[in-house]
Image (spheres, rainbow, N blue to C red):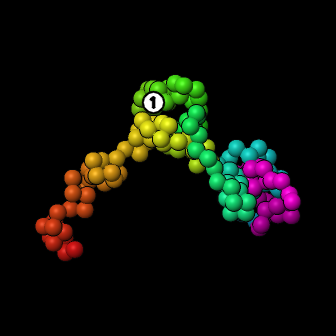
Amino acid sequence: MATYTASDFCQGHGGGRDCTYSEEADGCLQHGDMDHGVISYCDGTCTEAREHYNRYLRVELGRELQASATTVTLQVWGQGISYEVTFEGPQAEDRALAYMSARKGLHFGDVFDRPFSYDAFPRVADALHPTCHHGLSLDLCMDPYGDAHFGTREQELANGW
């Protein structure tokens, strides 16, 4: 049985330029296509390679990722940047929250292939996925109908629902 790594699932990284006629035989599909790269230089850290590898592990090998109770890894993006940051140890939750708080202009999310335990880090989970008193997404509770989520009976009738 073959042993694969995430880099084996990379779709290739090219130079991001149009192919010329002379390059068609070297990996471009046809004149004008983007250079997707004949040989991938991916080290397995790109999101696409990790997604394909994770799907392979789940579907082909039946392996599920275990959520970490000791480490919080967050995806960070915005203002032209994108990266991941990891917090470990007994102060991981406090450090992750402080990091998020100090970077108000950025967005934060879970990293699909490095899940953390929501039970072990409930405050980080709540910061990433705030819920209302109904247990639903806070975004749904705030807009467009406020506390009713889907509107009152009168609002629904007024909209023809």
- Asked whether 14 falls inside the magenta stretch, the response is yes
Q: Nearer the viewer, residue 83 or 52?
A: 52
The quarter holding residue 45 reads: top right
Task: Name the image quarter holding the N terminus.
Answer: bottom right
Q: What SS does tag 1 mark? A: helix
**Does residue 71 sit above or below 109 in this rendering?**
above
Residue beneath label 1, please? Answer: 97
**Does residue 55 sit above or below 111 in this rendering?**
below
83 left or right, relative to 40: left
Is residue 125 at all visible to an observer of this figure? yes
128 left or right, relative to 150: right
55 left or right, relative to 95: right
Is residue 99 at all visible to an observer of this figure? no
- Asked whether 86 falls inside the magenta stretch, the response is no
Q: Main secondary structure of the magenta part?
A: loop
Q: Nearer the viewer, residue 10 or 13?
A: 10
Residue positioned 54% across, 25% down in the render: 90
**Does residue 139 sit above or below 154 in this rendering?**
above
Q: Nearer the viewer, residue 159 or 73?
A: 73
Residue positioned 45% across, 41% down in the render: 125
The quarter holding residue 43 reads: top right
| Amino acid type, residue under disc 1 in the picture | Leu
User: Which residues make up the magenta segment?
Assistant: 1-30
What is the x, y in percent for residue 63? 68, 55
52 left or right, relative to 72: right
What is the x, y in percent for residue 131? 34, 47
